[in-house]
Image (cartoon, grey):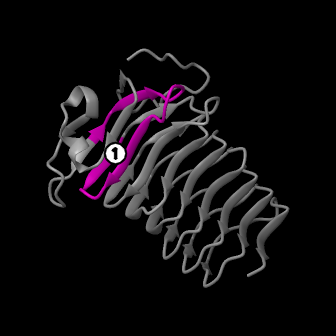
Amino acid sequence: SDDIHSEHPAPMRIEYTIRDPILIDGNAGFLGDNSSTGIGQGSGTITDPYVIEGWKIDASSQHGIQIRNADVYFIIRDCYVYDGIVTWRSGIYLYNCTNGHLSNNTCLNNEHGIQVYRYSTKNTLIDNNCSNNRYGIDVSSSSDITLINNTCSSNNWDGIILYETTDSTLVDNICTENYRGISIVLSSGNTLINNNCSNNRNGIDVSSSSDITLINNTCNSSNWDGIRLAEV
């Protein structure tokens, strides 16, 4: 497909199809036709999840891919979502969602590359690139979220932020050249293992939080503060 966004071109390894933003609200929202849902396959079960993949979406008018109030099993993978930053839109936005799996998506130049918001639980984000946004990955008021091997670099504020979020795990994420690499605020019971948080202002910034476990993370001297603990 044509590259209509030359400043942040889509990765060349995937052939994308251009389409309008996607909004799915409730489990029943997955049952519409492909033209509205973007779903290519699946029935929403653990062995046959709904699959949304291969789309190139301009998020300047609304969140690029938005799923709300759903607990069926779904996958969002190999999508490229961009340009939501001017209108405060997210590339991918989950609200009150359970059982989502987001993998190998590229979210550039949005307010949030990926936002997992309020009452969401048991969602997994793996191998996503959320760079050049205001916030790379924002997990707020949620629990049991797993982030593995995501790249969140050159975001204006946080590469990854956990806000009022509990019992979540971050492993092997790369958060470089952000204001803060990983930020944890008003949260508890979270574990960070083998993350690279170098070349930020603060590598890992933990504030007003408790029961946070940090194991073998890299926060090199190019940060102002490698690891900062405040009011913990």
The residue that label 1 is drawn on is 76
Q: Which of 93 and 156 is in front in this view?
A: 93
Task: Give percent across and percent down for residue 22.
Answer: 36, 33
Circle 1 packing at 10 Å, graded few (<14), some (14-19), many (20+), is many
Q: Is residue 89 left or right of residue 205?
A: left
Quarter of the figure that contains the N terminus: top left
Can residue 175 be seen?
no
Location of residue 206 by image quarter: bottom right
Q: Nearer the viewer, residue 182 or 175?
A: 182
Quarter of the figure that contains the C terminus: bottom right
Q: Residue at x 61, y 30 (%)?
A: 87
Magenta part of the chain: 52-77
Q: Which residue is drawn at 55% across and 51% down?
A: 151
In the rendered image, residue 70 lying in the magenta stretch gets the answer: yes
Q: Is residue 38 left or right of residue 181?
A: left
Can residue 214 be seen?
yes
Task: Give percent across and percent down for residue 6.
Answer: 57, 19
Badge 1 amino acid = Ile
Secondary element at image label 1: strand
Task: Give percent across and percent down for residue 76.
Answer: 34, 45
Q: Say above or below: 7 vs 189.
A: above
In the rendered image, residue 37 lying in the magenta stretch gets the answer: no
